[in-house]
Image (cartoon, rainbow, N blue to C red):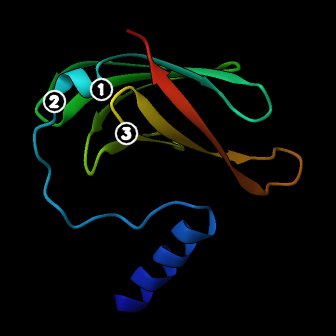
Amino acid sequence: MADLMSILSANYKAVGLTVPSNTPYVAVDPKLYQGSWSGKYANNKSFNITISNISGFRAKVHYQSDGTSKYQDVLIKDGGFRIGDTKFTLVQSGTALIKNVVTDPATGSTYLDQAYATQAT
């Protein structure tokens, strides 16, 4: 089991993601997360994230970017959550770091797309 965890840990780090935390889930301040978030990746592709219905550490999230639209119930832990291949991490009030693992359809290789999102006021 320890070998499996070290392999998973290495794979997370290879694409710039963090290893899952052992901290417990705790209720979050809904004002820090709820609402519309937007930003642009380095290739100028824009994205929007809408977070709603926050209850404790649970929320409903909608991610949109360039023809991709994902709806998902998420669990917020350690200041962030995942929706599909996208990781949302709160950096400070009103600013989040978005990391999106993208798979090239032609080659099958993956790369990490990163951008900052700002919360609409």
**Residue 83 on image: x %, y %:** 44, 37
> Whole-Å distance between the Cαs marked 2 and 3?
12 Å
Q: Which kind of residue does numbered mark 2 sit on?
A: Asp
Residue topped by disc 2: 29
> Could you say whether the residue bearing mark 1 is in a helix, strand or loop?
helix
| Marks 2 and 3 in Cβ contact (< 8 Å) | no
**Residue 118 on image: x %, y %:** 48, 23
Tell me which corner region of the image, top left, top right, bottom left or bottom right, holds residue 119: top left
Number of disc labels: 3
Residue topped by disc 3: 90
Give the residue displayed 73% in from the left and 48% down from the top.
103
**Residue 79 on image: x %, y %:** 30, 45
Give the residue displayed 13% in from the left and 57% down from the top.
24
Tell me which corner region of the image, top left, top right, bottom left or bottom right, holds residue 81: top left
Q: Is residue 95 left or right of residue 13?
A: left
- First in residue order: circle 3 vs circle 1: 1
**Residue 14 numbered mark, or none:** none
> Could you say whether the residue bearing mark 3 is in a helix, strand or loop?
strand
- First in residue order: circle 2 vs circle 3: 2
Give the residue displayed 79% in from the left and 57% down from the top.
109
Residue topped by disc 1: 33
> Whole-Å distance between the Cαs marked 2 and 1?
7 Å
| Marks 3 and 1 in Cβ contact (< 8 Å) | yes
